[in-house]
Amino acid sequence: MDKEMQPLLSVRNLAKRFAVKKDFWGRAKEYNYALNGVSFDIFPGETLGLVGESGCGKTTAGRTIMGLYRPTAGQVFLHGKELDVANGPDKRIQMIFQDPYACLNPRMTVGEIIAEPMEINGVYKEAGAKKQRVYDLLDMVGLSKEQANRFPHEFSGGQRQRIGIARALAVNPDVIICDEPISALDVSIQAQVVNLMSRLQKELGLTYLFIAHDLAMVKYISHRVAVMYKGSIMELAKAEDLYNNPMHPYTKTLLAAIPVPDPDVRADIALIKGEVSQNVGTGCPFAGRCPSASDRCWAEKPKTKVINGHIIACHLYV
Amino acid sequence: MSTSILSVKDLSVGFHTYRGDIKAVRGVTFGVDEGEIVGIVGESGCGKSVTAHAVMGLLPKENSFISGGSISFMNNDITTLSEEAMENIRGSAISMIFQDPMTSLNPVLTIGQQMTEGVKGLTGQEAYEKAVALLERVGIANPKERMKDYPHQFSGGMRQRVMIAMALMGNPRLLFADEPTTALDVTIQAQILALLNELRHDMKMSIVLVSHDLGVIARICDRVNVMYAGRIVEQGTVAEIFHNPQHPYTKGLLNSLPRMDMSLDEELPVIDGQPPDLLYDITGCSFVSRCGCAMRVCTDTKPVEQSVSDSHKAECWLLAKNRSKEAV
């Protein structure tokens, strides 16, 4: 990405906590920080991959940026202007959801599903133009206009995800947040959907925030990748750099754990011990599982710094 | 490595539905030898889980039927075994672990109660001690304390460890693992796969690993069966399948995974179309509509299994052509 370019979407110190325990009066006694001060930029036409294990806050990040959750702290800027979270979701940010079975209303036809965001946002008031737009969108995602009158249950998982993509495109968004869009699909169908998404990006100049746990797919589709752990970004770098030269110990272990479809790559798998624990102390969130953790890691949360083009939060690098 | 533990011959399984009978498994033949890990890989709906459930005798009685073939376990035919006789084998000689460790444990019983519940021929004390030892073996810290805990007090990875320990209570010779790591994170998945690999050496058991993830299969399996639309379309050793795939479906499946050295400018090779509807009979090859090398014979006649090597077989007419060329 060009250094001079203005970021399209900027996230600054975004935090979101959820109450895990409430007292008798319904007041929160204990919080779980799903997002703990996350900052990143996404540039126009770029795909930023966001990876991490379940519970690391990647979905919360997507939903908070989208405006579905009200952030506890921090700001989201779009085109350099701060988004007012009180207004709820902004139509310039749209979302593709993980489960193609749950995200489409079974009682609406595909045409109605795709037209709904246009109605809500008041674009294409004239019925004929709206209909034409629905047909164009169906064509764009590789479905036919005859299918507009069918119901979601008549479609396979891959086709439903195409419908979800058409719906997200309906109001010409600037940013599309893709929350694990392919993890519910079969391998051969995943490739079809990913190819569609990258084709649409080239044709329409879309910007994606691609949330996933499949590291190989994220590497393929993303220009830059951010690795999250327990609500914080551990490392963010260009996809090539991150995968060829991971710097953060967590990135290293995560990459080593990917099952590679090659039986010769079995040997010497460095296993990471332990599991993600809930307690967020004052130190580095990864200290409990890190092979190179020192006393400092337990005491002090590392600040993010830029080293060799990697944005990294780790005490190992000065 | 040569003693046969499980031999499935020409197994066919169907389900009654309101649309008609779905033929989910259409003549599946495979074997498992002592101490080996055999993988069954395929996409959703290809019949891999149904095959596993059929061998376990866990198919729902009301709407499913085995329409042909035989299953023999340690040289005894278990296809037509009564429910009582099957209960003696299931959970002891053959065990199973399931995909979702969250839902396959009973939430209102402690881990200890569940582990000792189905054990035969041991006193309560012996069963308790065995359960503690196994929990320790699968890597649960403070097993004696954890025996008193309920499933919700364990994380996903820990629950899958408990499931594995529970499956080992009857000293199984054969363990079916149906997508054991699909619900887990990659780092935890790597731990569970390593554990399964250790256990098969320690306990001298065979494992059938059912998965849709080629990476998981490549990591621990010795031999692989690739299933498509209810049939095994290719089988071979893990090296043969991954380094020298013969069936266009296997090739397509391997190609559609993004390689680490790929850039966004290269389009991912895809397998176009959808798998066939298993409600209907398929006259030719089940893959014909999606295959890039389909010939007329493929639509008309079912492909016959062709041997590539002693261990490597594929059901594809392309291989027959090659062979006849060599013969001529």
Image (tube, coloured by chain):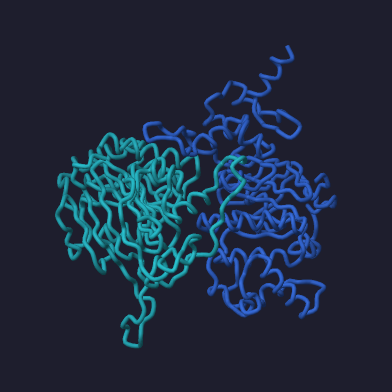
Chain colours: A cyan, B blue
Q: Is residue B215 above or below residue A294?
A: above
Q: Where residue B302 sits in the image (x, y, percent)?
A: 66, 29
Most extreme residue toward the top is B328
Task: Answer left or right for B180 relative to B9.
Answer: left
Q: Nearer the viewer, residue B302 or B158?
A: B158
Q: Is residue B312 above or below residue A13?
A: above
Question: In which quadrant of the rendered image does the N terminus of chain A lie?
Answer: top left
Q: Quadrant of residue B150?
A: bottom right
Q: Nearer the viewer, residue B268 or B142?
A: B142
Q: Where residue A3 sits in the image (x, y, percent)?
A: 22, 42
| Residue name at image x 73 percent, y 67 percent | B169
Task: Answer left or right for A162 relative to B311.
Answer: left
Q: Where residue B212 sits in the image (x, y, percent)?
A: 56, 47
Most extreme residue toward the front is A318
Task: Tally the marks.
Answer: 0
Most extreme residue toward the right is B75
Q: Nearer the viewer, residue A297 or B195?
A: A297
Task: Answer left or right for A250 relative to A84.
Answer: right
Q: Quadrant of residue A71?
A: bottom left
Q: Nearer the viewer, residue B278 or A281?
A: A281
| Residue name at image x 51 percent, y 54 percent | B186
Q: Where residue A187 sits in the image (x, y, percent)?
A: 50, 42
Q: Quadrant of residue A234?
A: bottom left
Residue A153 visible:
yes
Question: In which quadrant of the rendered image does the C terminus of chain A lie?
Answer: bottom left
